[in-house]
Image: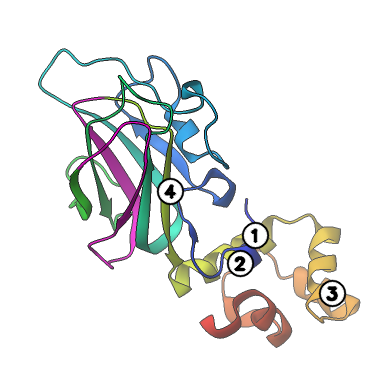
Amino acid sequence: MPDPRFLDGTIDLAALEHGGDVVDCSNTFYSSPVQLLLPGRATIMGDGWENARRRDGGNDHVTIRLAARGQVRRVEIDTSYFVGNAAGWASLRGTEADHPDEDEEWFDLVPKTRLQPDTRHFLRSVSAMPVTHVRLDVFPDGGLARLRVHGELVADAHWAAVLRWLDLLPAEHAVQVLRGAGVPRQSAEEFLRQRPFADGDVLPAAVLSAFLGELR
């Protein structure tokens, strides 16, 4: 569970360390697609997502639940260390659905684009619509080292992340967080007895400022 105080501004919405995760994948023959979301750059081909060659007319794909609903600004598709088996083409689509399936309406963030082997590709999103999930398609197959989906959480999603985090913190840890935001210990303890928080309006003004700044 990431600290929402560090989820402001432009972040990698797909990163594991920010709460992103893989929820569906067409092929895990050689390695897990979760490696696409690891921090840092790959150092060898085995650090990325290597899939088996396809023998049908389809293509390989990975669906990722983002840290929270957000607007995608730019995307990095990294084929570093993949040469003869790198993905030749890729696209990235998004959806606003909380629990997407094949019937959900997906829209382009990065249209189908030619990739080069052993290269970091930086691409602008063609849509500013908020998304909860992204689907990366590679055509017809081929490995990737990393996927970065840079953007900002929408205000409501950031607020929900604050409430969820405060609900889950151990009591003394939560007290220390609130004291660091300027809330006296007694007030922090009284406030935390209201957990779980159903309504963000119960948060003290100092907490609102410390966590969300101008978002409220």
Q: Which mark is residue 162?
A: 2
Is the Cβ of the residue at disc 1 closer than 8 Å to that at disc 2?
Answer: yes
Amino acid under disc 1: Trp
Question: Which residue matches tag 1?
Answer: 165
The CA distance from mark 2 to mark 4 is 23 Å
Amino acid under disc 2: Val
* Residue 216 seen anywhere in this rendered image of the structure: no
Q: Look at the image and give the residue range highlighted in magenta.
A: 114-141
Q: Seen in the image, is 168 located left or right of residue 107?
A: right
Amino acid under disc 4: Arg
The CA distance from mark 3 to mark 2 is 16 Å
Between 157 and 90, the one nearer to me in the picture: 90
The CA distance from mark 4 to mark 3 is 35 Å
Compare marks 1 and 3 and give the one earlier in the sequence.
1
- The secondary structure type at the circle numbered 1 is helix
Residue displayed at 43% across by 27% down: 81
Compare marks 1 and 4 and give the one earlier in the sequence.
4
The CA distance from mark 1 to mark 2 is 5 Å
Question: Which residue matches tag 4?
Answer: 148
Amino acid under disc 3: Arg
Question: Which residue matches tag 3?
Answer: 179
Is the Cβ of the residue at disc 3 closer than 8 Å to that at disc 2?
Answer: no
Q: Seen in the image, is 201 located left or right of residue 45?
A: right
**Vertical order, 121 against 179 (above or below):** above
Q: Position of residue 87 (x, y in %)?
A: 27, 29
Compare marks 3 and 2 and give the one earlier in the sequence.
2
